[in-house]
Amino acid sequence: MLEVKNLHASVKGNEILRGIDLKVKAGEVHAIMGPNGSGKSTLAQVLAGREAYEVTDGEVHYEGKNLLDLAPEERACEGVFLAFQYPVEIPGVTNNYFLKAALNSIRKYRGQEQLDAMEFLKLVKEKLNVIELDQSLLNRPVNEGFSGGEKKRNEIFQMAVIEPKLAILDETDSGLDIDALRIVADGVNKLRSKDNATIVVTHYQRLLNYIVPDFVHVLVDGRIVKSGGKELALVLEEKGYDWLREEAEVNA
Amino acid sequence: MHRIAEIMTRVVDKNIEWYLSSFKDFERGLNGESRQPIHRLRRSGIERFAELGFPTNKHEEWRFTNIAPLTKIQFKPVTRPYAGNLTASSIEQFTFGGLNCHTLVFVNGHFIWDLSSISAPNNFKVNSLASAMRTDGDLLNEHLGKFIKGDENAFTALNTGFLQDGAFVYVPDGSVVEEPIHLLFVSTGDDISFLSMPRNLIVAGRNSRVSIIESYVSLASVPYLTNTATEMVVGEGAVIEHDKFQDENLNAFHIGTTHFQQAARSKVVSNSIALGGSIVRNNVTAVLAAEGIECTLNGLSLATGQQLIDNHTAIDHASANCLSHELYKSILDGKSRGVFNGKIFVRKDAQKTDAKQTNKTLLLSDEATMDTKPQLEIFADDVKCTHGATVGQLDEEQVFYLRSRGVMLDAARDILTYAFASDVVHRIHIEPLREQLDGILHNRLRKGRELVGVE
């Protein structure tokens, strides 16, 4: 589904990603872990198409397409979804309006009929249940006045409605208490299928107790320095990241 | 140098002369009416106009608004009612479909009975000003020209000089007018540049309630000038909503003045929507003359191309314990220009004043410009006054957020632009008007609209 080859990216002339290689197949869950400043969020943002990041080298193929050639909205329409680390507030636009605009834009891109008001409402109600959110949320402006936890749950709710092929969760666990974490993780798990894939970007192992990854990759200084199975996350929890940094320096 | 200045003075004088000689023609046609007290008001207006002349950028009040393009043209004041080829069906598009209201239609500033629909009111008076001069002379003598005297600037002076027709609404003490009163000003003409100068007088008695919609639209193919003035006398405890909706075409110049004179415990909500016109100046003044008054002034301007939309507001807190709340927003695209000047005076005795002013501008293009100037003059010491002005572009984070959810760039910008305007739109209480405006905004911001299936 996704193949990242030797990806280099910089922001304002500072190189953040220094050669990332990553392969994600349908049905898989990959966790990207690493210390602060290692480039985890940059990778997520680059995949979503954030223009502030300049790709200086490398390739990204997604479902047979050159992902880097696509505008952010085209990536979304092709099935890429980024759950934001810091979801954006949009005063004056209700969640309902926002989601309807998103969903119908994606459907239009795919040559599908637009949903009418009833079909749309039925769909969002169903998805609200998945993530245990109240219907009143629909009429509130996007993320405005939401608590940190509500914002993260709203991201997963959007994901549930949009049903992406490739979901990238950027630090979705930060700022969540244990109950919210469980709800968010349950939501993500319910949406997992053999046809879609998930990349979970996280600093802590905690979330991975609930969303169990098939692969864990450790990012240090813009490179993946170690990959392994889910047990690698537990090692990191115990030993931290420093030993990997030292190892990486020795190898470099 | 000297010569150029001299020539320019002469050009301007020539145009002043034009209006003075037009006035003489107008006066000759009055046939005896010139002995009425109202004519003294006209004379003082035109004399004042001759003294003042048209303002230039050298006048502080017109520093950012160059009206040279309109002072160069000799517009012919329309002094006789004439509906041209307009019919009920040609103006139907301007009547806010589904709105139950009294509609007074004015063509080039003159009342046209055949196009209007007024269901015989029993608890208030609604009429053309021209008719009211015959039937309600005493009320006019008492109120007309008391607050817009015609000495404020060249335009109100000129309007007062040619004072002839417009709307007259009188709501007696305690009366509630259920249906809004829609004053529809249509401009039409295909040969000579004309000048439409309606004059409206609205008097709301003690504890009365009324909603007035003033809308300005055009079917004209020639350049023309609308120079309108509305006096609103708001009695004790009266509640007024006033929605001004200006959507003239790009041939139009529009200069408008609205004055609210508020008595104790009265409430005014004014929504001023400016979408059309090539050069537009809106003056809105509220005098809070006694205690316990609430005054809300909202405004929304949407401009593109070469349009210039200038909003000048003044709130005069002349008495204690009053509240004013002001929100003006502009959305500027193309090479358009916006101006906001918001004066708030808090007089020495106006203790416990609570005044809040906000001006926000969204620039959609690099070539659009905004000049904003809050002007607070506070002479009382126990008051709460705040003001804030922002000028900015669309928030890139918000644009990216929408795009990351599959919304195309154009549509994302439209959605956010609409969101910026929506809080002013939602302050309009008359639903069909709000829906119409919503529709117009959505239309101009089309991409986002298609996605959510708004009809």
Image (spheres, coloured by chain):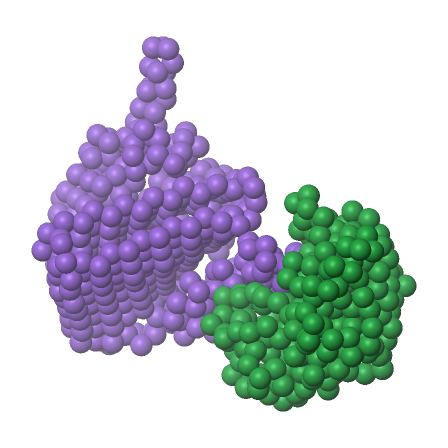
Q: Residue at x 26, y 43 (%)?
A: B156
Q: Is residue B435 left or right of residue B72?
A: right
* Residue A204 picture location, percent across and down: 65, 73
Q: Nearer the viewer, residue A103 or A36?
A: A36
The image shows residue B324, relative to residue B81, as above or below, that is below
Quadrant position of residue A59 = bottom right
Residue B71 at least partly seen: yes
Rendered image quadrant of residue A233: bottom right
Query: Residue placed at 64% from the left, 82% from the top?
Result: A184
Q: Considering only vertical position in the picture, is B77 above or below A117? A: above
Say if B331 sits above or below B59 in the image: below
**Residue at left offset 50%, top offset 74%:** A146
Residue B411, compared with residue A127, is above or below; it is above
Residue B376 vs residue A227, the one in the foreground: A227
Q: Nearer the viewer, residue A150 or B262?
A: A150
Q: Quadrant of the N terminus of chain A?
A: bottom right
Q: On the rendered structure, is A114 left or right of A251?
A: left
Q: Residue furthest left?
A: B349
- List x then y, in percent, for residue B219: 50, 51
Q: Is residue B438 visible?
A: no
Give the chain coloured green.
Answer: A
Chain drawn purple in the picture: B
Q: Position of residue A229 (x, y in %)?
A: 82, 77
Q: In this orientation, which residue lies closer to the viewer: B107 or B208?
A: B208
User: Is B51 left or right of B99, judged from the image as shown?
Assistant: left
